Image (cartoon, coloured by chain):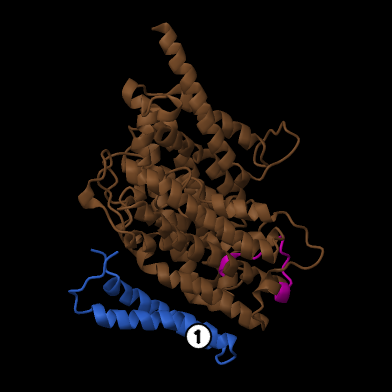
Amino acid sequence: MTTSEKSPYHTPAKVVGLAALAGTILPPVAFLCGAMPLDTVKGIMLVSTILWFVAAPWWMKVD
Amino acid sequence: MTTQDHEHAGQGMVDEVESPAVGSEYERERVPEGALKGPSSFWGMYAGEHTAGTEFMIGPLFVKWGADAFSLIVGLLIGNLLAVLTWRYLTAPIACSERLTLYSKMEKIAGRGLVTVYNLANGLLFCFLAGSMITVSATAVGPFFPEGTIAMPTFSSTMPTGPAWIAACIVIGAAMTFVALKGYDVVALVGHYSAPWMFLIFLACAIVTLGKLGTTDVWALLTPPPGTERSISFVGIVLFAWFCNAAMHIGMADLSVLRFAKSPSAGWASAAGMFLGHYVAWICAALLLIYWVKEKGVNPQEGKDPGTMVNDAVGWAGLVCIIIAGWTTANPTIYRAGLAFQGVLPGLSRTGATLLAGAVCIAAGIFPAFAMRLLDFVGVYGTILAPVGGLIVVDHFLADVVGIDRDPAAKSGASVNMAVLIAWLVPVLIGLSMTAVSPVNPWGFEVPPWYLPLPCTMACGILYILLSKFASGRAAAAA
């Protein structure tokens, strides 16, 4: 895998992708700490999943 | 566990089937210097390809078998480390020296006819593996419907659970087969993009489970309750982790991938698959079932289907993960099984061969027995295919030392090297006859299948040396 340096979408996609990954793993941690209900965790994870698959092709573009 | 990087069954038909990380050219020749890739190309590929839907089955199966915390945490660590070391110090050096696919190398040693037999075995085993993935993916469909619409299988299920289950498997399997007919570029890319997210979903399942159980003491959770019967020992866990991908490392199927590596250090990339995809994912999946046993009274011998457990933990994101993890690994498996069948039946079109493979996979998927006995199946898979790696090790490292020809079939033009055929079949048949999957066991004891890949591979190598020496002695006497 190589990252495309030319695409203007690369940096925004990287930001969204990282946010999506954070949205996948941080809500469960918040649930573990008792700071977030499980239904909210599931909702954020689903939205993060959608965002990840939107961002990843632009961020992890394969040459 | 994966099949994506397995050996190609045909020639000139592989352009669509390679991972994005490695090229598909140079099927019949050494990979030239200009086509080599650095280690970074392999890390993401191994991480993605060894995080499959079936990981959701393997962790709970360890729970069913009463594995203790030490075996799971330390045993899996050691076993996966041994697998990485095998890739690094056995597979990768041979791959970087020979720079050939397993198919090409085997043809030089065993002859084209025997490679066809290997492909048939490979293709059939692929079908059953893909069937397991269809089974696991189908469990992710159930939670989308009202409870009870699709009766889910348990560990003890061997037959289809009902018409709705059969329909779910057929729909998923048909979709996978349809995509396989089109080639799997897109699926390979989806798998590539999914890898980091999929790993986090596994981790999220475990973290949520710990939250539900109100503890972070993983060691205590993994410790089975007193009186639990242990069906797998510490050594068994180590060997399973080491040899669940035996066909790829000691069996040398990953020559096809690692031949593109600039140096054998690329073999370390397998650590991404072994420690993220196997070690962490299996323990995370095990925690899911432990929660259901402790809090919902599920019998560990019956288990709970992955779809229900993952949906309960992380919701639809987890169900998407199961489907994608199954899809991205089953789809290339169906494609390659089709190629294998086409190698055996050259008159069959690619479409016909893929449809045949898809039909066998769907039939296997409908019957949960393959997925529910996944540990046994993976052991059998390694036992049958790994021994060819013993032949390659002998040919590469020992042939000159012990005084036998290197690449004998290439030199003689033989279609079937009888020394290879006997050296492969005898240890495999003896080994399999010792397992519970054998219909006949004359030994009076049973050996778990995952104990067998290493001894069968070593026996195959030793027999090959003896038979080659015997054959060359007879040829010299005749001359």
In the rendered image, the vertical position of residue A20 relative to residue B56, given as above or below: below
Q: Chain B is which colour?
A: brown
**Region rendered in magenta:** B294-307
- Indicate the position of residue B399 as horizontal and vertical percent values: 42, 29
Q: Chain A is which colour?
A: blue
Residue at the limit of the structure toward the top, as seen here? B478
A57 or B44, which lies in front? Answer: B44
Residue at the limit of the structure toward the right, as seen here? B227
In the rendered image, the vertical position of residue B192 relative to residue B413, given as above or below: below
Q: Amino acid at mark 1?
A: Pro
* Pointer 1 chain: A
Q: Quadrant of residue B351?
A: top left
Specify few, some or many for label 1: CA neighbours under 10 Å numbering under 14, 14-19, or 20 or more: many
Residue at 55%, 75% in the rendered image: B205
In the rendered image, the vertical position of residue B139 relative to residue B207, given as above or below: above
Q: Left or right: B207 with respect to B102?
A: right
- Indicate the position of residue B109 as horizontal and vertical percent values: 39, 30
B211 or B161, which lies in front? Answer: B211
B355 or B419, which lies in front? Answer: B419
Residue at 72%, 74% in the rendered image: B294
Report whether residue B326 is seen. no
Q: Name the magenta segment's main secondary structure.
A: loop
Task: Determine whether the residue tagged by mark 1 lies in a helix, strand or loop.
Answer: helix
- Indicate the position of residue B426 as horizontal and vertical percent values: 57, 28
Q: Quadrant of residue B281?
A: bottom right
Q: Is residue B330 on the magenta stretch?
A: no
Residue at the limit of the structure toward the bottom, as seen here? A35
B196 or B291, which lies in front? Answer: B196
Q: Mark 1 sits on what residue?
A: A27
- Indicate the position of residue B436 as horizontal and vertical percent values: 68, 42
